[in-house]
Amino acid sequence: MKKVLEGSMAIAEGVRLAEPHVISAYPITPQTHIVEHLSQMVADGDLKAEFIMVESEHSAASVVLGAGACGVRTYTATAAQGLLYMEEVIYNIAGMRLPVVITVANRAVSAPINIWNDMQDAMAIRDTGAVMLVAENNQEAYDMHLQAFKIAENRDVMLPVVVNVDGFVLTHTFEVVETIDDIEKVRQYLPPINMEYKLDVESPYSFGTLGEPSVYTESRYNLYNAMNYSRNIIIDSAKEFKDMFGRFYGSLTDSYKMDDAQTVIVAMGSVLGTIKDVVDELRESGKKIGVLKIRSFRPFPEEEIVSALKNVKNVIVAEKAICPGKGGILSVEIRDVLYKHKINSVNVNGYTLGLGGRDITPRNIYDLVLRAEKEENVDGEFIGLSQQYL
Amino acid sequence: MLTKEETYNQLFTMGHTGCSGCAQSMAVKLITEVLGKNTIATSATGCLEVFSTRWPESSWKIPWIHSLFENSAAVASGIEAALKITGKKGGITVLAQGGDGGTADIGLQALSGMFERNHDVLYVCYDNGAYMNTGYQRSGLTPFDAYTTTSPSGKESFGNQRPKKYMPEIAMAHRIPYTAVASAGYPLDLQKKVKKAKSIIGAKYLQVDVPCVPGWKYEPKYSVKLAQLAVQTGLYPLFEAEYDKIISVKKISKKVPVAEYLKLQGRFKHLFRDDAGKAEIEKIQKIADENIEHFGLL
Amino acid sequence: MDFKAGIIAMPGAALSNKTGSFANEIPVYQHKACTGCNLCIYFCPEGVVYGDKKTKIYDFDSDYCKGCGICAEECPVDDIKMVLVEK
């Protein structure tokens, strides 16, 4: 059924479809509407779950860790400072191989305190061992949550999956979303969670043991391998979703007008909408330009990126996060995989924009296209600075 | 009767690497014995977690999980929620455990949250009065004038200059249904309190005094003696409370001067050097006397 | 790939760790004055003491006893002696 839904409601509806058993959260803008909707669903009896409003994000993640270890389906959501506060627990969830799904309503990190959108928060957890997906619009956010549970709970993956959704830009924006109304079909797509090892008085295993130097490395290697393997499951989950529900947004990446493209803009999340509009116009004026969408940031879509960009002249990475002391983050990783595959003919320019909720306008994107053709190997350059504040 | 074969079936098994004479392992053994096999336990990071689960070994025969230092109570909240939603809560006790640092310092927020939400969880704080696992640094439950590696005694100091945090009273302030203080020195009293806690639905807090051989610096054979002296001096009052009301106290059978307790421990050795030390012992005696008066221990 | 490596252990697997090697001294139960009070069982930090209230015959498992001496110290009738382990 087609409905006009706020992004947060679309996410909550997507989570409801997965029928999680335990939801725990702590309020932080712009995540609040998601968990408000979910708690209302529980209050109304539309979702049979334990909803636990806790005293911090650290505990929200810990509650779903404990519940997840009992073999039930769990969910939490957060943003920015909350995600950073959760980070210690996310490492632990991943290390203990528990399939929790976490929505991050991406937001800038303090200081200065700023409640608006960018992706700096997500970058802070990139090495935790969580699978990190990024949604482009509300429909994809809705659909991606079902896929996230499927990926997390795959017995050869067993990792937390973070679904990144741009704060405000998506969470607080109303769009038409086509909902899935056949719950039996959903249950077929996402069968009941079935964990081999769980906290159970009948088989009383010990979880979270001390891993001494003799085994710690192997434990991390197993996690590393599982993350690599999750590539297959992300691809399969997207494909199976397409087969059953008809919608597809790419698997690890997605290409837009990439055939014959000489210039490619690489980005993640909602900014892709603006970028695609600009690319449409540039294409009309005859420019050979396309878009590469990163849908899975972790695992990093190395092969897909290489095959998409290897014959391109200019790559523009538009990034809403920065690594002080280095430069771009996504841009550096893209340059790295090209270098690794001995492709040195591509000019990769990384630009920083849209921080702390500053609008990314079509004008900004046009400017990037013009600049990138003149510049070489720009790394994390800030766009649109106000000179008066420098 | 306990046969040799049965010793292998204890829920907290032999083979852990706790120090010789460790009172915490004694308390864990006594507590799990009462709670029985239908128990799911969490542990905060600390001695217990390290010495009981060096992978691939584990001393636990009940399902057990360690996550982090500060989230034992929150993890237990999640376990309880999972049991509730899957209809398995009936008959299963959720036991959350932490040391004094994991409980009263870094874990206090998660613990307060668990109390306030009144999860059906028994939280046990094994109080040995410092961060023993990391090498005897002071915590919020380190007693007055105790030497620790971060509250050392010296020319200008008699050791830890703050009294113990009144953690059981903090628990009671949450109006949880049951709070109790017990001691490894009094196993029957301890087990009676665990049994009572097990029968109550809602959040329970049990703090157990567990002497620490290397941290307190005494001969391993004195673990029980010290735990008993802590009670008999009035320094570690044992009591039970329901909500905010104290309902019972363990009376002191024969009041012992605090010096008798202090002198057996290397962590108080500096108090026996000179007259200034004597004055400090008087201050500790005052703490004990105030406890005796406040709780009506005599 | 061993999913469990470093993170999940089997129940009671620590029994394979014979901590008796920690001991410098071990108790010798005299079986003379024992009243069957069970304190040695209660107070053993390892849980290695076993015995019977009725027969008043108690003993300990030297495979795991760390020799802390609490049982000997706390025995109300002094029926347990600590002796040095010959190594």
Image: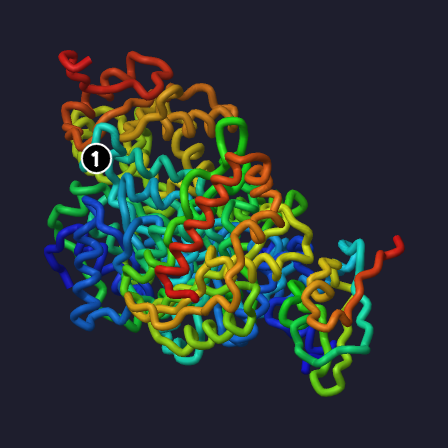
Residue visible at 65% across and 57% down? B222
Type of amino acid at the residue the image marks with label 1: Lys
Residue visible at 41% across and 25% down? A332
Residue A219: give x, y in percent of width and height: 58, 48
Side (left or right) of A235 relative to A156 = left
Query: Which sits in the foreground, A254 or A384?
Result: A384
Q: Secondary structure at mark 1?
A: helix
Side (left or right) of C19 relative to B195 = right
Say which quadrant the N terminus of chain A sits in: bottom left
Instruction: Name the subunit of mark 1.
Output: A
How many numbered tags mark residues here?
Answer: 1
Query: Which sits in the foreground, B88 or B272?
Result: B272
Residue A72: give x, y in percent of width and height: 40, 66
Query: Which sits in the foreground, A113 or B151?
Result: B151
Say which quadrant the C terminus of chain A sits in: top left
Check the image and report above or below for B24 versus B145.
below
Q: Which residue is mark 1?
A: A276
Residue B22: give x, y in percent of width and height: 63, 57
